[in-house]
Image (tube, helix red, strand yellow):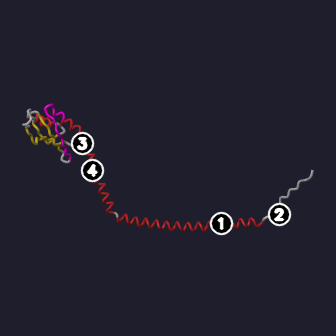
């Protein structure tokens, strides 16, 4: 058996210049990447300056458009007021009013129209009664309801052309609105 000879320190350098070329290429790439980085950094600075100028000009235009925003603010205020008015109308005691008007009429009075005026707090009721007494009883009964404070007969007219001679009337009642 022969001895194995291992030589770990060989003096053989096959391509010593190859490592230097790879190092030179890496350094050249590093220089190119560095110059590209500085070029991009310069472009970003230019774009940021332009963006700042645009923001500044937009801010000036926004200040020049101040009356327009005041107009839209007025429109919003009017819209909110309208919404509040609708909310007030929806929160009124409509059921109590309808129940009082219908339960007071009975069989001798036919209701023709109801015209509430929320701003004035009144309601105009038009109807037709079989007799003059039935009409007066209806007005008296409405006056006794908790929903209405003052009930006044505005006008009445006996229908002469009808064989039963009904009485058409209109009355005005003050509607007790919830605070």
Please tell me which residue lies in front, 51 or 174.
51
Mark found first going from the N terminus, 1 or 2: 2
Q: Secondary structure at mark 4?
A: helix
Q: CA distance from mark 3 to mark 1?
A: 82 Å
* Foreground disc of the pair 3, 1: 1
Mark found first going from the N terminus, 4 or 1: 1
Q: Secondary structure at mark 3?
A: loop
Where's residue 34, x and y in %? 61, 67
Q: CA distance from mark 2 to mark 4?
A: 97 Å
Which quadrant of the view contains residue 9? bottom right
Task: Tell me where the magenta segment starts and ends, as one range.
Answer: 102-118
| Residue 137 located left or right of residue 42 | left
* Foreground disc of the pair 3, 4: 4
Mark found first going from the N terminus, 3 or 1: 1
Q: CA distance from mark 4 to mark 1?
A: 71 Å
Q: CA distance from mark 3 to mark 4?
A: 16 Å
Mark number displayed over residue 29: 1
Where's residue 62, x and y in %? 37, 63
Is the Cβ of the residue at disc 3 closer than 8 Å to that at disc 4?
Answer: no
Q: Secondary structure at mark 2?
A: loop
Where's residue 12, x and y in %? 83, 63
Which residue is the site of mark 4? Answer: 82
Mark found first going from the N terminus, 3 or 4: 4
The image shows residue 80, relative to residue 34, as above or below, that is above
Is the Cβ of the residue at disc 3 closer than 8 Å to that at disc 1?
Answer: no
| Residue 43 located left or right of residue 18 | left
Which residue is the site of mark 3? Answer: 92
Which residue is the site of mark 2? Answer: 12
| Residue 45 located left or right of residue 63 | right
Q: CA distance from mark 1 to mark 2?
A: 30 Å
Q: Residue at x 32, y 58 (%)?
A: 72
Q: CA distance from mark 3 to mark 2?
A: 107 Å
């Amino acid at each position: 058996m022969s001895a194995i000879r291992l030589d770990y320190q060989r003096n053989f350098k096959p391509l010593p210049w190859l490592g230097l070329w790879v190092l030179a290429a890496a350094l050249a790439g590093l220089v190119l990447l560095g110059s590209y980085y500085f070029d991009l950094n310069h472009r970003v600075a230019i774009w940021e300056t332009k963006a700042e100028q645009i923001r500044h000009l937009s801010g000036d235009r926004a200040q020049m458009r101040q009356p327009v925003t005041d107009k839209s603010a007025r429109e919003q205020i009017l819209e909110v007021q309208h919404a509040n008015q609708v909310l007030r109308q929806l929160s009124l005691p409509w059921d109590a009013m309808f129940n009082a008007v219908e339960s007071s009429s009975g069989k001798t009075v036919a209701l023709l129209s109801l015209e509430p005026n929320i701003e004035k707090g009144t309601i105009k009721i038009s109807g037709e009664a079989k007799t003059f007494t039935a009409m007066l009883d209806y007005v008296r009964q409405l006056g006794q309801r908790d929903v209405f404070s003052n009930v006044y007969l505005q006008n009445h007219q006996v229908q002469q052309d009808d064989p039963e001679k009904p009485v058409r009337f209109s009355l005005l009642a003050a509607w007790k609105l919830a605070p």
